[in-house]
Amino acid sequence: MTGQEFGPYRIEEKLGEGGMGVVYRALDTRLGRPVAIKLLRADAAISADRKARFFQEAKAASALNHPNIITIYDIGAAEGADYIAMEFVPGRTIEALIARKGLPIGEALRYAVQIADALTKAHAAGIVHRDLKPGNIMVNSDGQVKVLDFGLAKLSASEPESEATVTIDRPRTEEGAIVGTVAYMSPEQAEGKKVDARSDIFSMGSVLYEMITGRRAFGGETKMSTLAAILNQEPASLSDAGAPVPRDVERIIARCLRKDPARRIQTMIDLKVALEELKEESDSGRLDAPQARRRAGASLR
């Protein structure tokens, strides 16, 4: 498809693909600017539900004006395919940056504060991301984070109490459908229950755990065994996972990853403030493992 004209866009390079779309770098020939074009997959186009989620991504993200959230430029159809045109972010995903080694604590906190700030904005607008993961977070050359893919987001205020939303190779006649990436789901999302902003807090804890350790908080050989780990197991301590960290950092991640939503950190703004305090202490050199009780940890008791 490289070099092909697609409406007002000229496709230049394939960037990646996911469950619902293929993403290309393209040129907006009207404005002469680079964009990222997500095309709805041909097999997804036959599903009204998947098509609705594809366009819901554009509507959810376009409603949010924030430096750490991807900007949506356009939505439409051309050459028989549906598309979303969005800001092109040159850089690497958190997933690529982590590799198998994890990130230095200061770097992880710098990114985490920005992610939390973006989600604070989304939650204030009643939007739950529902698919936060390292592959959905870009970092540009200046270290600025951009949160992508609000395709599974739902307006939390309008979500019916009875709705349980996933699809993990289960018959459609079963109650509930699981939507999201299995390894980063909250327990309530994995069970197909109603989710709110606290589900994103759990996912944020999983992302932060992986940023520091280079390992997933929950894993299994199959999707179902991973779901079982999320529902029934606790992740290894960060030290046991090979990443000795200050106790306050481990405590905050543990609070994010509690199975019961009522026992987690309750709002993203509280998590953001706690992370900011830890980042300040890290930047000043005052954050170290022996000092167990810092104000960030204490403020979340």
Image: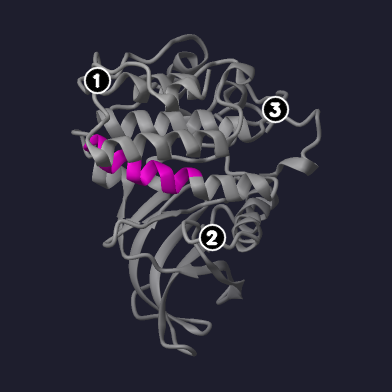
Q: Position of residue 107 (x, y in %)?
A: 27, 43
Give the x, y percent position of residue 236. Answer: 32, 13
Residue receiving disc 1:
289
Label 1 Cα crowd, 10 Å radius (few <14 / some 14-19 / many 20+): some
Magenta span contains residue 109: yes
Hey, what amino acid is under mark 1? Ala
Q: Secondary structure at mark 3?
A: loop
Nearer to me, 49 or 143 = 143
Task: Look at the image and tell me in which quarter the N terminus lies.
Answer: bottom left
- Residue for point 38% across, 15% down: 235
Q: Let me know if residue 19 appears in the view.
A: yes
Q: Nearer the viewer, mark 1 or mark 2?
A: 1
Disc 2 marks a residue whose amino acid type is His
- Residue behind mark 2: 66
Q: Earlier in the sequence, mark 2 or mark 3?
A: 2
Amino acid on which disc 3 is placed: Gly
Report if residue 38 lies within the magenta region: no
- The rendered magenta stretch, by its main secondary structure, is classed as helix
